[in-house]
Image: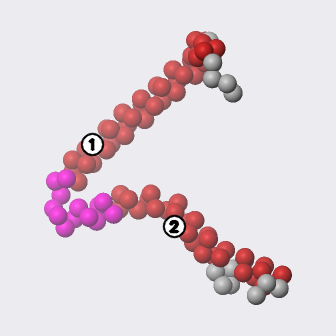
Amino acid sequence: MVFTLDNYARLLDPLYYAVLLHSLNMALMATLACLALGYPFAWFLARLPERVRPLLLFLLIVPFWTNSLIRIYGLKIFLSTRGYLNEFLLWLGVH
C-alpha cells in the first residue's frame, strides 16, 4: 500500500470514520477502566506493610508469566533428550 493523501481522505468516508470513532471510544473506555482499577490497587499496595507488599506484587505478576512458562515447558518437551526432535533425529540415524 502506498502512503498518499488519498488514504487519509478515506478517513472522512462515513464507514471508516464510524469505525475510527468506535475504536477510539473503545480505547478510551479501556484506559479509564485500567485507571479506575489500577490506581486504587496501587494506592492500597503502597500502604501495605513491607513484609506483605512483595507477596501481593508476586501475585499480581504471576499471570503475566504463564505464556512464557507454557512456551518454555513446550520447548523443553520438544528439545529434551527423550523429546520429539531427538527421537526423530535418532530415527533418521543422526547421532
Within the magenta stretch, is there residue 68? no
> In the image, which disc is placed on residue 39?
1
Instruction: Reply above or below: 42 against 29.
Output: below
In the shown orientation, is residue 65 left or right of residue 35?
right
> In the image, which disc is placed on residue 62?
none
**Residue 49, image x, y percentages:** 15, 62
Q: Which residue is mark 2?
A: 69
x 46%, y 62%: residue: 65
Residue 34 seen in the current view: yes
Residues packed near mark 1 inside 10 Å, few (<14), some (14 to 19) or many (20 plus): few
Q: Quadrant of the N terminus?
A: top right
x 27%, y 48%: residue: 41
Q: Quadrant of residue 88?
A: bottom right
**Residue 92, image x, y percentages:** 84, 81
x 77%, y 80%: residue: 89
x 48%, y 26%: residue: 24
Q: Which region of the structure is painted magenta? A: 46-58
Q: Quadrant of residue 91?
A: bottom right
Instruction: Reply above or below: 31 against 90.
Output: above
Q: Residue furthest right?
A: 92
Q: CA distance from mark 1 to mark 2?
A: 28 Å
For the residues bearing labels 1 and 2, Cβ distance under 8 angstroms: no
User: Tag 1, which secondary structure?
Assistant: helix
Kindly identify the amino acid type of the residue bearing the numbered disc 2: Leu
Q: Residue furthest bottom?
A: 95
Kindly identify the amino acid type of the residue bearing the numbered disc 1: Tyr
Within the magenta stretch, is there residue 50? yes
